[in-house]
Amino acid sequence: MIELMILYVLAKRELTMYSVQKFIDENFGAYSKPSFGALKPALVRLEKNGCVTTRKMMSDGGKLSVFYSITKQGLEELKKLITENLSENPLQFFSNARVKLSCASFLSKDECAQLFFHIKSLAVKHKFDAENIINNEYNQLSFYQRILLDNAICEYSNFITILEGLEKENAGNS
């Protein structure tokens, strides 16, 4: 997900590594906070793959600044990262789905429809799995497990409602 977030913020403007971190925090900080230590290797990978370029410039204070910008190949990679399937791991689902949904403005109407459908399908699956666990009479769930499963079911239900609203809005935009 870090490459997706980097490409998203670079698609808006050229930035230094520190500014990339700042803009990632501003755009995604409520549901994903990659460490600064993960940023440099991700930028290096993106540059090696031709998705970003660098420009070095000396500041007025004599300090070398490196500016990163997205390439045409990087914009294609951004779209690919947004539209590729999510992991089916429920632990990662919400943060990764939110990052992808936050970047949906780079997609066409049809690509958005496919993204919304895919994410909603996974949310329905995860909700169904949680309901099966809680409703299985053979499970010896503790009070705390039941509370957490109930909460997960509510979160999935709310997220499905949001996705249905996004689908409706997307279908209405021509």
Image (tube, rainbow, N blue to C red):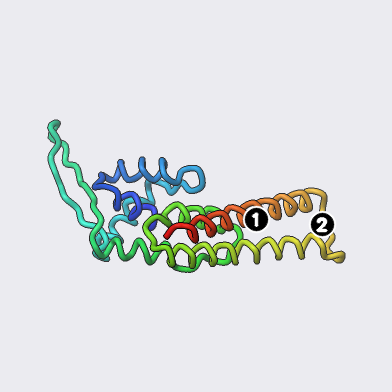
* Front residue of this view, candidates 164 and 88: 164
Residue occupied by mark 1? 156
* Front residue of this view, candidates 166 and 64: 166
Q: Is 25 on the left-hand or right-hand side of 149?
A: left
Camera sees residue 103: yes
Percent of width and height locating residue 92: 55, 58
SS at badge 2: loop
Percent of width and height locating residue 5: 39, 53
Query: Dot 1: within a 10 Å radius of its alpha carbon, few (fewer than 14), some, or many (20 or more) residues?
Result: many
Name above or below for residue 76 compared with residue 57: below
Residue occupied by mark 2? 141
Q: Amino acid at mark 1?
A: Tyr
Query: Dot 2: within a 10 Å radius of its alpha carbon, few (fewer than 14), some, or many (20 or more) residues?
Result: some
Residue 18 found in image quarter = top left
| On-image quarter of the C terminus | bottom left
Name above or below for residue 13 compared with residue 46: above
Percent of width and height locating residue 122: 59, 65
Percent of width and height locating residue 120: 58, 62
Q: Amino acid at mark 2?
A: Leu
Give the residue displayed 82% in from the left and 62% down from the top: 135
